[in-house]
Image: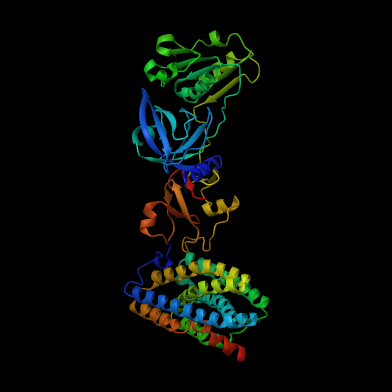
Amino acid sequence: MVDVRNVRGGDGLVGISDEVDEILDSVVESTRQATEAFFETYDKNPDPRVLAAWLEPRAWREIDYVFLLNEQIRRYGMGFSRTHITLLAKQSFQEAEHYEAVGKAIESLGGTVPVSVPEEARPWSEFLWDCLERHPLAAIAAWNVSETSASGSFEPTFRAGERHQFDEVVRVYRQIEIDEKFHVGLGRQILSSYARTDHDREEILRAMRGMRDIAWKTFTPESVAQRRRA
Amino acid sequence: MNDITMRDSMDLMEAGAVFNVDVAAVKTEADGVVSLELKSSYGQSLPGWTPGAHIDVILPNALVRQYSLCGDPQNPEAWRIGVLREPASRGGSSCIHEDVRVGDRLQVTTPRNNFALVDAERYLFIAGGIGITPILPMIRQAADGGKPWTLLYGGRTRNSMAFLDEISTCRGGEVHVMPQDEFGLLDLPRFLGAPRTDTAVYCCGPGPLIDAVEENCRAWRAGALHRERFAPSVKPRLETGAFEVELARSGQRLTVPPHTSLLSVLENAGHKITNSCRAGICGTCLVKVLAGTPQHNDDVLSDADRESGAVMLVCVSRSESELLVLDL
């Protein structure tokens, strides 16, 4: 019933909202397909360490969001309303909780929680930080796509969780699924509230298009294989 | 779902549970008094009740009023309530008299009885005005049980006194209909002056009548007098900005203070509500509204959802009516 893409805000995305929605739909589908492909592979060899390896770049995303959001507030926060500063900080806190929770799940599977950017997550991380350098709204646009991409992974993950009984992973992602609605809605509200010029909108679309082509890749079985070879 | 299951589900409802009824008939019973016949909205039998029971009615304007059931307890298909139009109505009785029509749907609670008829060898019933409503089914029960009974029934005028025809059909009793414009105040010493150990006294009416009956029963044995005041108890006035919520599945009532969110009040009362942002953005704390008018302060519900008033986000939204009934 509630669609966070319809969140109220300004009219800053008027004229590009159709493309924004196309990008979001596209990245959700790419991520869903990548996740389905991963679990098809996993079904043949349900090794918990493989699942842990699949989760490791996800854990890095969580803590990288924390770093990024805090820098976003420090660098650009005074251009936002106090409410939006508070909500960005709240998102940052929740991302830290997710890093902790996903980290525990990884350890329970015999994996190692990343404390530096995993190689397969480097394109994603570098693009995100590059966006932050370029424009006050670009990083928000990029993580809005990245956060949205995760929603394509939830249902395949929950179904696989039933097949393989990795209940703790499912429990963690059930909570992340709830929080992600907040993060996606907040990102959309900030973009529509503060985008004012065509240049703003161009930077938003550039960031979203770029992240659309990156965000789903660490969900693939090939990405996990690369990690396990490293 | 078959009829038996439906019936069972109604019988098993918790006390105070809220459900829908339809107004099957509206009848003028006296000057300023109407009765409503209520039937289940889904063709089910209604929960059972005993004489003296009352229900809460959640009115279309979200006010909640208590009314005694005055129909036949043996009839599971329909309930009846009698409603006096109060000259100083605060929106309850005037709403029923002006706005409620046959076919309307109302929300009601399952019956509660704080005025039950105890077993006695004989009964003295004293009713003032609309106070006849809980007394009427008591008279029938006493009559059906072959118990001697007496009714002392007062009112402003004969035309203002409801259910006189029905009372006249009840067997085995002695009826004294005493409108004030003909007889003055009820002659209580005549009926209560000689205490009887075999008689239970039941009184319902305005406060001064009950006060007078209590005074006249001082010499009666303890417990002989049973009374119910139909004037609403005076509730402490809510602070500006505060409102009440009723949780339909349990009947629990909670007050939401002006600067506390409904979500926090629900959580503090032990209810787990899914939520994340607590700012009206994520939509995860969506709750269905069964009655009352939400004041939407969120950023994400569609205009259609807002206008329907059927859902709200409890993290930031409040109430425009004094009461909200939530599907919790």
Residue located 46% across and 27% down the image: B70
> Would you place residue B273 above or below residue A124 in this image?
above
Q: B146 left or right of A4? A: right
Residue drawn at x 63%, y 70% as measured from the top left: A168
> Which of the pair A166/A210 is nearer the observer?
A166
**What is the basis of the colouring in this image?**
rainbow
- The reply to whether residue B239 is visible in this rendering is no
Residue A230 image offset from top left, x and y in percent: 61, 91
Q: Is residue B52 above or below residue B64?
A: above
When the figure is inspected, residue B231 is found, relative to residue B241, above or below; the finding is above
* Residue A146: percent from left, percent from top: 48, 77
Residue B153 rendering spot, x and y as whole percentages: 47, 16
In the image as oriented, which residue stretches furthest toward the bottom? A229
Most foreground residue, A70 or B280: B280
Relative height, residue B135 to residue B48 (above, below): above
- Residue A222 in view (yes/no): yes
